[in-house]
Image (cartoon, helix red, strand yellow):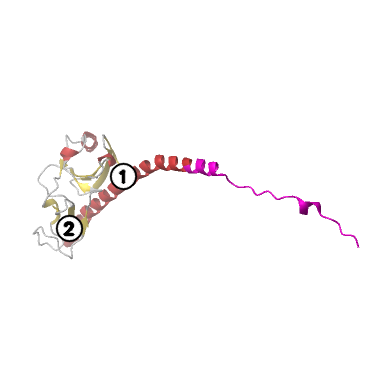
Amino acid sequence: MKRHLNIDDKRPRCISGFGVVELLIVAAIAVIMLAIAIPSFLQSYRSYQLSDAAGQVELAVKYTRLEAIRLNTPINCWSRQLANGNYQIWADSNKTNNGIPQASEKQIMLNPHGNMTAIANVPNTAPIAAAEGVAQVTAIAPGTAAILQFDQRGAVLNAAAPPYAIFLANTQSPAAGYRAVIILASGSTQIWSSSANGGWHRTY
C-alpha cells in the first residue's frame, strides 16, 4: 500500500510575536500618555472633592432650616475649627444653643480637600453679588460661632444684610478653585463655583 506524503507536514512553522524594541516603544507610549493624563485626572478629582464639600455644607444648612420649621423654633447652624485646622458644621437641633455639638445632632466634618475659608482668600466675588442684585454678599467668617440662625418659618435671622456666603477652598491645592454656598434671606440656597483665578458661575 502506498502512502501519500503531506508536503505541508515538512514545512517549518513560523512563530510570530513582538520584538523587544516593539515592546519598549509601546511601553514608552503608555508612559507618555499616563504622564499627560494623570495631572488632568488629579485636577478633576480635586475639583470633585471641593464640589462635594460644598454640597455637604449646603445640606447642613438646609437641614438646620428644616429643623427650625419642624420644631417651630429658631435653630442655629454652628461651625468651629478643630485642632487639625479643619471645620465642623452642625445644626443645634436639641436647642441647647451652647456651641457644643451633641451626638444626636447632625454634623459634617470638612477636610483640607474642601474646607471653609475667609473671603479675603477668594477671588473677585462681584459676579455673585451682581447676580443677586446687591452691592456685595455677606461672607460668613469661619470660626467658632453660630454662622446662621433660622426662624420657625425657615427665614434667616442674621443681623447683617443677605445674601450670605460660605466660601470653601482646597487648602492643599489652591488650583482646584473655590466654591460658595449662598443663603438668601428666605433660607433658600445656591452653590457657585470658581476657578483659582475667579470667573464665578452658578452650578446649583
| Element class at badge 1 | helix
Q: Quadrant of residue 175?
A: top left
x%, y% of residue 65? 19, 55
Q: Amino acid at mark 1?
A: Ser
Location of residue 199 with respect to 180 vertically, above or below: above
Q: Residue at x 36, y 41 (%)?
A: 39
Q: Amino acid at mark 2?
A: Ala
**Nearer to me, 140 or 13:** 13
Q: Quadrant of residue 139?
A: top left
- Residue hosting label 2: 91
**Which portion, as a residue range, is magenta?**
1-27
Disc 2 packing (10 Å; few <14; some 14–19; many ≥20): many
Location of residue 135 with respect to 61 vertically, above or below: above
**Nearer to me, 125 or 23:** 23
Instruction: Kindly report the distance in space between the C-alpha atoms of the residues bearing marks 1 and 2.
Output: 26 Å
- Residue hosting label 1: 47
Q: Quadrant of residue 173?
A: top left
x%, y% of residue 89? 18, 54
